[in-house]
Image (cartoon, helix red, strand yellow):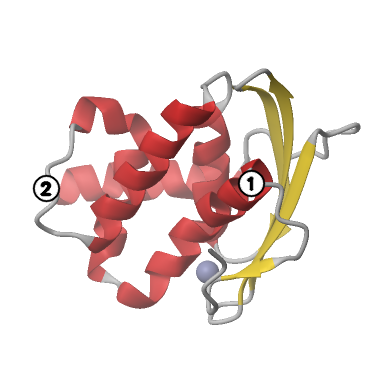
Amino acid sequence: MSDLRELYQQLILDHNKNPRNFRVLDPADRFAEGYNPLCGDKVQIYLQLHGDRINDIGFQGSGCAISKASASLMTETIKGKTLGETETHFKNFQAMLTDPSSNLDLDQMGKLFVFAGVRDYPTRIKCATLSWHALRAAIENVQTPITTERDNS
Ligand code: ZN
């Protein structure tokens, strides 16, 4: 298991160092900002939609390795997906981090599974989920920045 952990850590560090889709989309159909005051993580999400499909996604931001790597892997995962598929990924990701009893389809989780270990570090869970909350805000066209310390629903 420790080898696997090391592999996961390397993947997280790689995505932190070389984040994928780390760019502003201009023009963007949707934009949202997220902030995690507990850690100081900030993320901006840009979307280009085609019907109910996410044609392209970009992000900007600053923060810890987990928040940046999570945003990077999220963009990789959901690019080209429908909004329905994206919502499923969001729910699976959140369940993986917050619900130990959740029954996850690991094949479906794909690379997102590298964040499973974050469950053991409760203060970092919000670092990992921040970009997903911002993505959802972008999809729902929320105009004000969201924070992890307030219920935005
Ligand atoms: Zn963080």
Q: Is mark 1 within 8 Å of ligand 1?
A: no
Which residue appears at 67% of the width and 18% of the height? 51
Q: Nearer the viewer, residue 3 or 153?
A: 153
143 to the left or right of 150 = right
Q: What is the total number of numbered labels drawn onto the structure image? A: 2
Where's residue 31, x and y in %? 77, 46
Q: Secondary structure at mark 1?
A: loop
Q: Residue furthest right?
A: 27
Which residue appears at 54% of the width and 55% of the height? 133
In which quarter of the view is residue 55 placed?
Answer: top right
Which residue appears at 28% of the width and 48% of the height? 6
> Disc 2 marks which residue?
1
| Classed neighbour count for the residue bearing mark 2: other residues with Cα under 10 Å, few (<14), some (14–19), many (≥20) | few
User: Where 74 sits versus 94, above or below?
Assistant: above
**Viewer can see residue 16:** no
User: Cα distance, mark 2 to mark 1?
Assistant: 39 Å
Where's residue 25, x and y in %? 83, 34
> Disc 1 marks which residue?
140
User: Mark 2 or 1, which is nearer the eye?
Assistant: 1
**Viewer can see residue 126:** yes
In which quarter of the view is residue 103 placed?
Answer: top left
The answer to whether the residues at label 2 and label 1 have Cβ atoms under 8 Å apart is: no
Callout 1 amino acid: Glu
